[in-house]
Image (spheres, grey):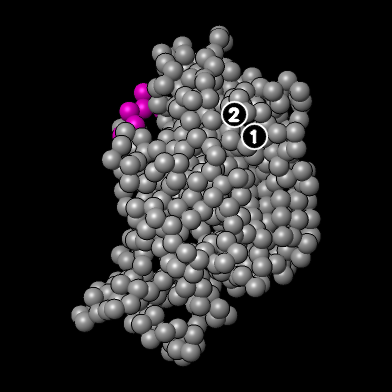
Amino acid sequence: MTDATLPGLLDTRAANDPDRVAMTVHGIGSLTFGQWASRSDAVAAGLVERGVAPGDRVGLVFGNGDWLEYVVAFMGVGKAGAVAVPLSDRVPRAQADAMLAHCGASTVLRPDRLPYASGSVFRADRSDLAQILYTSGTTGRPKGVAATHANLAYGCGGKRRPFAHSKHLVHAFPIGTNAGQWMLVNAVDAHPQVVTLPRFTPGRFAALIEHYRAGTVFLVPAMAIELLAAGAPAANDLSSVLLLGSAAAPLPSRVAVQLSEAFPNSTITNYYTSTEASPAQTVMLFDPDRPASVGRPASGGAVKIATPTGVPLPPGVTGEVWMRCPAATRAYYGDPEASGEVFRAGWVRMGDVGYLDEDGFLYLVDRESDVIKSGAFKVSTIHVEDVLHQHPGVVEAAAYGMPHPTLGKAVAVALVGSVAHEELRIFLKDRLAPHELPVRLVTLDSLPRNHGGKIDKRALREVAT
């Protein structure tokens, strides 16, 4: 369906199957397609009654227990012809206010303040702006990434719905993230009922999978590490899971191996994309022969390793990661200069450094901003972290650069786990090059994360000093 929009897809599903449950928040309630469509119509009418005009930006500040109200509000904004600006209620108030001011939001919706009314609604065109999603800001100032209706609905509306092997899809992605928006799209377009929970804990999440006999499960690596560390898979029957997808960050190879053991009937799949590049992505079905790869392009997309000006580099040579797909590309809202640096002729500069092997599989070396320039060497924090995770006493670890009097910068490591530092140094000595060995080790109770679940290395440097 090449002319699809998400509001249009919702109305079609509501007309064809109004009583089918689209989404459930466990312990709170469910939403059928019919309810979703009618309530979003009422929100759209309420926004129009408030004076919201097509193209106006509308902030959506919701918590993870508010998924049902959130998806109604999101579709209501779209049906009013306005632009949704999703924000988690976990974002600090000052930061959220700055984002809403940056995009010029005319109004803000919260779960207890949805404007229901009756009346006609505006139908947006596929080329109209639909969403502004702010990046996590783990390496710099958050930027508002603007997406059209055509971008959000790319690949939707086909005869065969995604994840047709499942009756239920379980996830714990937070609102206000690109991964969370992907789950909203799945709720509209995919075959299974989408199920989530107000707050992630390993035990609750595993019990949720068992309760619904979920065939598809999505999480981020941090959640996978918590599940394994808590022993949750052993305490629950997870045999129903046929597809376990990990997104938002690279999955350490040891963690992937442990997941394949904990979910015996599941294919472990890693998805690599970004808020800027979506829906372009690479997909990797876990392969013990390529444990560190994040896969090859999916859905007609492409990936290349290139110089900063876009000149392609041959296999095996490290350079910048660029991605593209046939969908309408995104852009930074109100920032043409930054857009020109990242979005180029249909390609998106990912901000990552990596290489392709001879078969076209992508390997990430590091975030460009996280590469540690130590003396004459460049150190990949991803590689150091992957080796750290191989020690059984390390639950989680993050590598970062710290000032060094002679090298400029050297490797520092913050970890969660019970391993003694001297034991870990001995373990690393035979597995890392001399310039990759940490000059400092710090054990913490937990690693600082942003609301999307990614390790915040700027905050880590502060708490680990």
Magenta run includes residue 82: no
Q: Earlier in the sequence, mark 2 or mark 1?
A: 2
Secondary structure found at label 1 = loop
Relative side of 268 to 251, left or right? right
The C terminus, quarter of image: bottom left
2 vs 392: above or below:
above
Does the magenta run of residues contain 104?
yes
Which quadrant of the structure image shows residue 37?
top right
Side (left or right) of 180 relative to 245: left
- Tell me, yes or no, if residue 302 can be seen here: yes
| Left or right of 74 in this view: 402 | left
Residue in the foreground of this view, choosing between 272 and 89: 272
User: Closer to us: mark 2 or mark 1?
Assistant: 1
Q: State how far apart marks 2 and 1 are (Cα).
A: 8 Å
State whether residue 270 is above or below residue 39.
Answer: below
User: At numbered mark 2, what does the secondary structure look like: helix, strand or loop?
Assistant: helix
Q: Which residue is mark 2?
A: 6
Q: At which x and y percent is residue 400?
A: 36, 70
Callout 2 crowding tier (Cα within 10 Å): few <14, some 14–19, many ≥20? many
Q: Which residues are magenta?
A: 102-109
Which x, y percent locates residue 248? 52, 54
Residue that numbered label 1 is attached to: 156
Residue kind at label 2, given as amino acid type: Leu
Residue displayed at 38% across by 74% down? 379
On the question of residue 133 being in view, the answer is no
Q: Position of residue 242 (x, y in %)?
A: 76, 56
| 366 shown above or below 82 | below
